[in-house]
Image: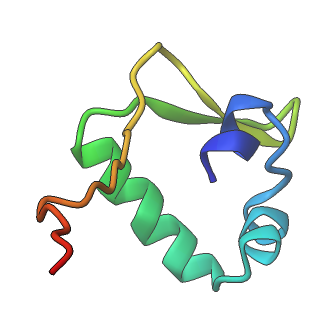
Amino acid sequence: MDSLISMKATGTPEEFAEKLGIRRSTLFLSLQEMREMGVDIKYSCYRQSYFYADNRRIRIKLENIFSETTD
């Protein structure tokens, strides 16, 4: 999702949802959640793509919080 928005290559909402393998309604829910977290995502009718209107993004990081020990 982030890559397509960053590249302004989402296409229409229907195309974007298809690229992500989700329903259009799920796409709209995800975009709304991101907006509620402070990410300024807009849609350009001219470009037919979503885009970031500022430099804010959501970064998800997974890390192992338990150290692995060997016995």
Quadrant in the rendering for residue 48? top right
Q: Is residue 9 left or right of residue 24?
A: right
Q: How many marks?
A: 0
Nearest the viewer among 45 and 51 is 51
Indicate the position of residue 69 as horizontal and vertical percent values.
16, 69
Would you say 52 lies left or right of 31 here?
right
Furthest residue toward top: 55
Q: Which residue is nearer to you in this view: 57 or 47?
A: 57
Identify the residue at image location x=31%, y=57%.
33
Residue at (73, 82) in percent of width and height: 21
Of the 4 image quadrants, the one containing the N terminus is bottom right
Q: Residue furthest front?
A: 71
Q: Quadrant of residue 44?
A: top right
Q: Percent position (x, y) of residue 39? A: 36, 33
Q: In the picture shown, does residue 21 fall above or below 52?
A: below
User: Quarter-wise, where is residue 52 in the image?
Assistant: top right
Residue 50 placement (x, y as % from top left): 68, 40
Vertical comparison of 7 with 5: above or below? above
Residue occupying the point 70% across, 41% down:
3
Task: For the C terminus, give its image quadrant.
Answer: bottom left
The image shows residue 8 at horizontal and vertical percentages of: 79, 33
Residue in the picture at 85% in, 66% down? 15
Snapshot colouring: rainbow
Residue in front for this viewpoint, 68 or 41 = 68
